[in-house]
Image (cartoon, rainbow, N blue to C red):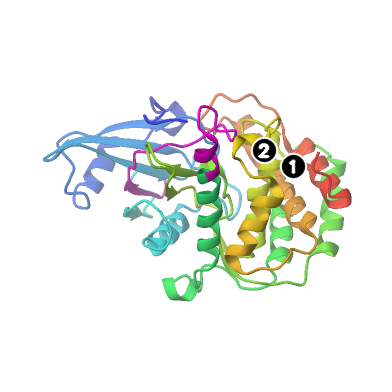
Amino acid sequence: MTTEPPVQDVRPQHRFDEAALYAFLKPHLPELGPNLEVRQFQGGASNPTFLLSTEGPDGLRRFVLRKKPPGELLASAHQVDREHRVMKALRGHVPVPVMRVLCEDAAVIGSAFYVMDYLEGRIFRDATLPGLEPAERAAIYDQLNATLARLHQIDPGAVGLGDYGRPGNYFQRQVARWTRQYRDAETEHVPAMEALIERLPARIPKDDKVAIAHGDYRLENVMFHPTEPQLIAVLDWELSTLGHPLADLGYNAFLWRSHAPGWGSLDGVDFAASGIPTEAEYVAAYCARTGRAEIEDWSFYVAFAVFRLASISQGVYRRVLAGNVASDRPAENGAPALAEQALDILETGAAS
């Protein structure tokens, strides 16, 4: 877990005109002092994220800037304007940072960006939550579950998000979308991906419920209070849309089947002793909170989530090869292994 922001000097490929940024922000942020320090958050393979620090009239103030990455981008990806819109709309309904300003004029720093308040808190990178007591672990996972359930019960129209996506036929459109994204970034033949592209459409459930879907809901994308097991912010809304709530839940629950500590994994956890719920307990708690009965064909939702992860991984791999990510990760394609796991889940329901 981290309390101080993990920042570094701005990577060469992500540098921009900081003076132009300051000139744009000054009318919008009265807290700005005479100087603005820009550092880049470490990691992240999607939208580059920066810490803005300034000594204003009231002392040190920090903000966070998210922008589109450089280079050629895949269609419908990296839409920072949507991130800004959904978080601004959900303020007061689920925990999100305060949005300050959106700039869609690429002439300012080279791409669209937005600025939000910086929050101090804990982001848990290790899903096993080492060093915490069982009761704290239980509370953290309960907060994660309760916040997702709360999000899915918000009426999109009531918060101005009725047109945030196309309602209905979500999985049909999503399978088609991630197939296109995969094809756009394809670098090799992956038999398991081909099998998923062929078989997933036939397994799409009849349930066509619509909710605000986060799209990347997991422990690493939320922030907790510095000392208490209280969730204070849901972050990284880039993939959010109007979608099926069980797509979010299936993706969230992949944590129990993931073997990649970098993404999140619970391998080796003694659930009875740790305070962390089992996958079945976590899903049951969500169903109880949302008034949903037992989920039919649960394997589809998890398999779809892993298929989507495989497509995303393929896109990240393509961008690593191009040198357009904010990390020094090796050029290793995770799509084939994820596709094989997704296919195994789809066909057998296996948790392996």
| Left or right relative to 282: residue 130 | left
Residue type marked 2: Phe
Give the residues in magenta.
110-138
Label the magenta part by its dominant secondary structure: loop
| Left or right relative to 240: residue 100 | left
| Residue 199 forms part of the magenta stretch | no
Q: For this rendering, which residue is in front, 36 or 271?
A: 271
Q: Quadrant of residue 320?
A: top right
| Residue 186 circle label | 1
Q: Is residue 51 above or below residue 196?
A: above
Q: Label 2: which residue?
A: 271
The C terminus: image quadrant: top right
Q: Residue visible at 57% across and 29% down?
A: 323
Q: For this rendering, which residue is in front, 323 or 280?
A: 280
Position of residue 80 measured from the top left corner of the image (x, y, whole percent)? 45, 52
Count neighbours of disc 1 (C-alpha within 10 A) and say few if under 14, some if 14 to 19, many if 20 or more: some
Position of residue 30 measured from the top left corner of the image (x, y, whole percent)? 16, 49
Q: Residue visible at 74% across and 58% down?
A: 175
Q: Is residue 21 above or below residue 260?
A: below
Give the spatial CA distance, label 1 vs label 2. Answer: 38 Å
Q: Quadrant of residue 17?
A: top left
| Left or right relative to 188: residue 308 | left
| Residue 125 forms part of the magenta stretch | yes
Mark 2 residue element: helix
